[in-house]
Amino acid sequence: MPSASVLEQKKQIVAAVADRISNSCAGVIVDYKGISVADDTALRKELREAGVEYTVVKNTLLKLAISGTSLESMSEVLDGTTALATSKDDYVAAARILNKYAEDHDNFALKAGYLDGEVMSMEKLKDLANLPSRETLLSMVANVFSAPIAGFARAVQAIADKAEAPAEA
């Protein structure tokens, strides 16, 4: 039987993971077996730069952290090697980066994901992963809003240029 200090330490880990999940807008659980240290380091760097927290988690501790929550159904996939990636403010970053990595590495796979406290199907997780980044989406929206204004400006300029052109006799 584990000592009291070990049990207390595990309780703190469970509480920290539960708090991390509840304070995140999105998260992804992955099976990371078979990746090299160099690949793992590069993946962690990319996730960190995107503001995603990525850690290896023991399955039993993660099960305890999500028990009694709306994410409890994710317990079904908690076997083998498990890592958790969470983001506090970017809904897409973790899914996009990890899905891209999974496509390039055969041993790496997405297990489950959640968005705003609700478990997503694998199909929705893949769809989320294929969305462009927030900056790209914002630039697309800006272009949509500016297109009519730019068209109007070109039309006004064409009218002004036509009015300035000398009339031919």
Image (cartoon, grey):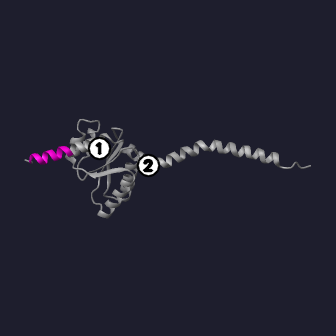
Residue occupying the far left of the picture: 1
Instruction: Residue at 39% x, 47% y: name it.
Output: 126
Query: What number of labels is visible?
Result: 2
Q: Nearer the viewer, mark 2 or mark 1?
A: 1
Q: Nearer the viewer, residue 20 or 66?
A: 20
Q: Position of residue 87 (x, y in %)?
A: 36, 46
Q: Secondary structure at mark 2?
A: loop
Q: Nearer the viewer, residue 13 or 122?
A: 13
Q: Quadrant of residue 104?
A: bottom left
Q: Position of residue 133 (x, y in %)?
A: 46, 49
Instruction: Residue at 13% x, 48% y: name it.
Output: 6
Q: Give the class, few, some or many, for how many residues have Cα within 10 Å of label 1's Cα (few <14, many ≥20).
A: some
Residue bearing mark 2: 130
Instruction: Residue at 38% x, 45% y: name it.
Output: 125
Q: Earlier in the sequence, mark 2 or mark 1?
A: 1
Q: Position of residue 50 (x, y in %)?
A: 39, 52
Q: Magenta stretch mostly in which secondary structure?
A: helix
Three-letter residue code for mark 1? Arg
Disc sitting over residue 115 in the figure: none
Q: Position of residue 2 (x, y in %)?
A: 9, 48
Q: Is residue 115 above or below residue 135?
A: above
Residue bearing mark 1: 20
Q: Is residue 104 within the magenta segment?
A: no
Q: Is residue 82 left or right of residue 137?
A: left
Task: Give the extent of the magenta segment.
Answer: 3-12
Q: Is residue 4 within the magenta segment?
A: yes
